[in-house]
Image: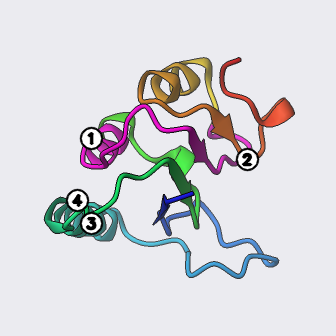
Amino acid sequence: MPGVYISYPFCAQKCTYCNFASGVFPRVTEARYLDALRAEIARHAWAWRPETVYLGGGTPSAMDPDALASVLALIPGRPWLEATLETAPGTVTPESARAWVDLGLRRGSNLPGGVVQK
């Protein structure tokens, strides 16, 4: 099943057990990273259609919903068969969950039952 993995390496703190290339970085670094990520996705020659999308690495659930929307809008194949977002405690609110559902995300890695919406 063809899929896309997007790493979002920004965290509120670096957990001691984490092996991802992630950490606590200045906000300006996050903005530059998102610009570079959008540019890379936009110029990719999609010779195939993604069926899955997974956002991980760091804490993508902390990403601003508008920034997340701008990234996901560049990935073809919507609605995807599976779309998952790694979540961290303290980053999930009813508002963020609604925004994720509106963006086509259906699973959260640390949510009860893993489901954003049934």
Judge whether residue 46 is colored magenta.
Answer: no
Question: Is most of the magenta stretch helix, strand or loop?
Answer: loop
Q: CA distance from mark 1 to mark 4?
A: 9 Å
Which residue is found at the position 48% from the left and 38% from the top?
A: 80
**Measured Cα–Cα span from mark 2 to mark 4:** 23 Å
Q: Which of the two marks, 1 or 3, is nearer to us in this view? A: 1
- Secondary structure under tag 2 reads loop
Q: Amino acid at mark 2?
A: Ser
| Residue 21 vertical position relative to residue 6 in the rendered view, above or below | below
- Residue 52: horizontal and vertical position, in percent? 52, 49
Q: Marks 1/3: CA distance?
A: 22 Å
Mark on residue 38?
4
Q: Residues within 10 Å of mark 4 (few under 14, many from 20)?
A: some
Labelled disc at residue 4: none
Q: CA distance from mark 2 to mark 3?
A: 27 Å
| CB-based contact (under 8 Å), mark 2 and mark 3 | no
Name the residue located 28 percent from the left edge and 65 percent from the top edge: 37
Report which residue position mark 3 lands on.
28
Examine the rendered structure and indicate whether residue 55 appears above or below residue 66.
below
Q: Which residue is mark 1?
A: 73
Q: Earlier in the sequence, mark 4 or mark 3?
A: 3
Q: Which residue is mark 2?
A: 109
Q: Amino acid at mark 1?
A: Ala
